[in-house]
Image (cartoon, helix red, strand yellow):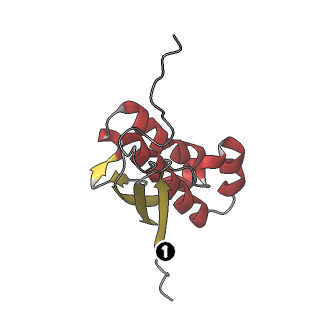
Amino acid sequence: MAKKKILIQTTGQRKRAIARAIARPGKGNVFINNKSLDFVQPEIAKLLMKEPLVLAGDSAKSLDISVNVKGGGMMGQASASRLAISKALVEYNKKLKETFLNYDRSLLIADSRRTEPHKPSRSKAGPRRHKQRSKR
């Protein structure tokens, strides 16, 4: 009987960034927007995305993960990719869920904070800023 191919699709969000990850059996290669994870810059973003892979250990070495990320800024995209990668690893190996939650809850649970909308008549000043007043 032929072996069933595993294809895992997950998503991750952070602020305006949305990452879609596809994991399939392989040799442990990770690509972010068709670029190898080793060539991602800046270094802090690369380390952030590698965290779930380091925690997973050998489980991560049997999956090829391809992440497509759009929107937001550089660190928002890194956090969204990190979330998508860790969700894919947990779906592949359920034992990793407790490890990830004990290490950092944000590996599996998205941060729901968003920017506050600007208030009317002061649209460029910000949501809560008032005009500066002199006391003397």
From this view, report whether residue 128 is shown above or below residue 136. Answer: below
> Residue 36, position in %: x, y?
31, 48
> Residue 101, position in %: x, y?
69, 49
**Residue farthest front in this picture:** 136
From this view, report whether residue 63 is shown above or below residue 74. Answer: below
Name the residue: 40% across, 43% down: 122
Residue 98 shown left or right of residue 116 in the figure: right
Q: Is residue 107 visible?
A: yes
Name the residue: 34% across, 54% down: 71
Name the residue: 48% across, 43% down: 127
Name the residue: 29% across, 55% down: 33
Residue closest to the eye, 74 or 93? 74
Q: Is residue 26 visible?
A: no
Q: Under tag 1, what secondary structure? A: loop
Density class for disc 1 (Cα within 10 Å; few <14, some 14-19, many ≥20) is few
Q: The residue under label 1 is which amino acid type?
A: Ile
Residue 52 shown left or right of residue 96 in the figure: left
Residue 61 shown left or right of residue 38 in the figure: right
Report the number of numbered marks.
1
> Residue 24, position in %: x, y?
43, 67
**Residue farthest top in this picture:** 136
Residue closest to the eye, 41 or 64? 41
Residue 114 shown left or right of residue 68 in the figure: right
**Residue farthest bottom in this picture:** 1
Residue closest to the eye, 101 or 12? 12
From this view, report whether residue 52 is shown above or below residue 45. Answer: below
> Residue 109, position in %: x, y?
62, 55
Which residue was labeled with disc 1? 6
